Image: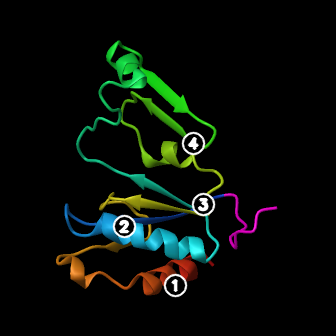
Amino acid sequence: MDSSPLKKNTPFIFAISGYKNSGKTTLITKLIPELKQRGYRVAVIKHDGHDFEADVPGTDSYRHQKAGAYGTAVFSSNRILITKECREPNEIQLMRAFPEADIILIEGLKKSNYPKYYCNYPKESLKPVKELADEIEKMMK
């Protein structure tokens, strides 16, 4: 039985936006345990405005990708990692990967229409985590 407090089929989406080094990742890594403590299952989608390399050189999946595979997947008894080439992917496609999530935090997407908190400089000015978690819970209801 699912014990999470949110009983919807669709995860609540909340963006943490701001420019590079504004504290987005720091805030998210503090917000995740606070939301988990409140009983929510949290997933994170990070938008990268530049291309990135997810695989580590020397691993089998890296070699598969470099050999020309359009996609690779690695799985164990505890997790999966899927990497694939995709023309103009969007966050909607990624959200489908987390149907069990109660909340999906998106790091980035400054111009999106999702409810969001905007990180400004300096990092010390970030909103307290408990206060932000309270606001997210209010928006979810």
Compare marks 1 and 3 and give the one earlier in the sequence: 3
Compare marks 2 and 1 and give the one earlier in the sequence: 2
Q: Secondary structure at mark 2?
A: strand
Residue at the extreme right of the image, as rendered: 1
Residue 36 location, quadrant: bottom right
Tell us which disc is closer to us: 4 or 1.
Answer: 4
Instruction: Pick whichever, 75 or 82, lies toward us.
Output: 75
Compare marks 4 and 1 and give the one earlier in the sequence: 4
Q: Give the answer, above or below, for where 7 lies relative to 139.
A: above
Number of the label disc, if any, that sits on residue 134: 1
**Rounded to the nearest whole Å, what is the CA distance between mark 4 and mark 1?**
30 Å
Percent of width and height locating residue 75: 56, 33
Compare marks 2 and 3 and give the one earlier in the sequence: 3
Tell us which disc is closer to us: 2 or 4.
Answer: 4
Percent of width and height locating residue 56: 32, 32
Q: Amino acid at mark 2?
A: Ile
Q: Which residues are magenta?
A: 1-9
Find disc 4 in the rendering and name its residue.
79
Residue 15 location, quadrant: bottom left
Find disc 3 in the rendering and name its residue.
11
Based on the picture, tell me whether residue 120 belongs to the magenta stretch.
Answer: no
Q: Residue at x 53, y 49 (%)?
A: 95
Q: Amino acid at mark 4?
A: Arg
Q: Residue at x 37, y 20 (%)?
A: 65
Instruction: Pick whichever, 110 or 133, lies toward us.
Output: 133
**Rounded to the nearest whole Å, what is the CA distance between mark 2 and mark 4?**
25 Å
